[in-house]
Image: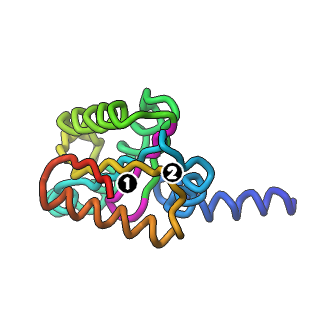
Amino acid sequence: HRKQEEERIAYLAYHDQSLGIPNSLKLSEDIDNCAGPDTYILCFDLKGLRDINNVYGRGAGDMLLEKIAEWSEKWPEPDAQMYRIKGDDFVILLRNHTEETAMKAAAGINERFDIAWDVELNGMTQSMYTGVHMGVIQVANKPESQTALLNVIEVVLTMARKENKTILFDK
């Protein structure tokens, strides 16, 4: 029983409670274990989630986030994992990539977000559109701390929002 309880606590510590995908604590730990010249993170936030919540109700935004989490589980990119940082901020960790393949992966994500997400609401299928602001960051070295990592992600997302395009962040 004790081992199961420890596993449950570890799961709760490392996963987003509403989506069941890894969280920022798990991202920080995973980056500590794989940082190197072939490691990249694609950080993105969703455009227009507030509008979706305002039009369809908060439950609609939550259901859209669940659809996106399901999509990430089936994403064909090898050596990739999606993490929820907070709210509508996400990161995809890419291992064994080059700058070129990381940028191609980012382009693929942008293409997916150009297509509507079908969400079941009150027995009807609603097609919802949400784009992304995205930044690509090479993680050649371990970050000093989880806070330092999250600060870099926030800076990159702020730049991506301002530029309104995918940016390659090379400090």
Q: x, y (%) of residue 79?
A: 52, 34
Amino acid at the residue labelled 1: Phe
The residue depicted at 30 percent of the width and 36 percent of the height is: 103
75 vs 1, nearest the viewer: 75
Which type of secondary structure does the marked residue at label 1 adopt?
A: strand
- The answer to whether residue 63 is above or below residue 16 is above
71 vs 81, nearest the viewer: 81
Q: x, y (%) of residue 29?
A: 60, 58
Residues drawn in magenta: 85-95
Within 10 Å of disc 2 (Cα), the crowding (few <14, some 14-19, many 20+) is: many
Which type of secondary structure does the marked residue at label 2 adopt?
A: loop
Q: Which residue does the numbered mark 1 point to in the structure image?
A: 90
Does residue 115 appear anywhere in the picture? yes
Residue 96 in the magenta stretch? The answer is no
Amino acid at the residue labelled 2: Ile
The residue depicted at 53 percent of the width and 68 percent of the height is: 144
Q: x, y (%) of residue 169?
A: 29, 53
